[in-house]
Image (cartoon, rainbow, N blue to C red):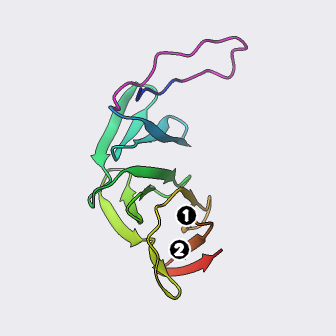
Amino acid sequence: DGSIRLWDGRLASAPASEGLNEHRSRIISVHCNHAHQVVSGSSDGIIKIWDLRLRKPLASFQSLKTGGRLTALAAHRYAPIIASGSDQSTVAIHSLAGDAVDLVRASQGFLGQRQTPVCALELHPLKLVMAVGSPDGSIALYSSGAAQHYS
């Protein structure tokens, strides 16, 4: 329904607290990247950076400039970047303010073009390295403009 529910793990039988209800479509992923910040992304490509103390978004932006649906989302633990994958074989990199940093075409293969949606994203917790998974079983690692593909 596009809502995010929060629990206080310090309380044994605490019910879900008031939700964060500003997304209009299905939530794809939620990441806690700082003590009071949560990053969420919905299938329509809207990414929101929430301040949990205020229960309001600090930023909201459209990550899909090339169309399609958002299929994966990752937020870096320390660097102020967010990666969002789409069913159009692209990964958009944004700052926490929503500024576009880069667009990676995940369809570039070793022996030619592959057209496969992005189904999984992960950012290394300490380095600027990104892993992109596809439904065909391949994994691409991106770092400093270089990509390596594994099957």
Q: Measured along the vertical axis of the image, is residue 98 above or below residue 93? A: above
Q: Residue 15: where, in percent of width, then height? A: 60, 12
- Asked whether 22 falls inside the magenta stretch, the response is yes
Q: Residue 41: where, in percent of width, then height? A: 42, 43
Q: Quadrant of the N terminus?
A: top left
Q: Residue at x 46, y 76 (%)?
A: 114
Q: Secondary structure at mark 2?
A: strand
- Dot 2 alpha-carbon crowd within 10 angstroms: few under 14, some 14 to 19, many 20 or more: some
Ranked by sequence position, the earlier of labels 2 and 1 is 1
- Dot 1 alpha-carbon crowd within 10 angstroms: few under 14, some 14 to 19, many 20 or more: many
Q: CA distance from mark 2 to mark 1?
A: 14 Å
Q: Measured along the vertical axis of the image, is residue 116 above or below residue 60? A: below
Q: Residue at x 54, y 24 (%)?
A: 6
- Residue flagged by tag 2: what amino acid is it? Tyr
The reply, left or right, for residue 93 in relation to residue 131 is left
The reply, left or right, for residue 107 in relation to residue 135 is left
Q: Residue at x 30, y 41 (%)?
A: 60
- Asked whether 42 falls inside the magenta stretch, the response is no
Q: Residue at x 53, y 86 (%)?
A: 110
Which circle marks residue 142 in the picture?
A: 2
Which circle marks residue 134 in the picture?
A: 1
Front residue of 121/31: it is 121
Q: Measured along the vertical axis of the image, is residue 131 above or below residue 9? A: below
Q: Secondary structure at mark 1?
A: loop
Q: Residue 76: where, in percent of width, then height? A: 53, 55
- Magenta span: predominant SS is loop
Q: Measured along the vertical axis of the image, is residue 92 above or below residue 63? A: below
Q: Quadrant of the C terminus?
A: bottom right
Bounds of the magenta span? Answer: 6-23
- Residue flagged by tag 1: what amino acid is it? Ser
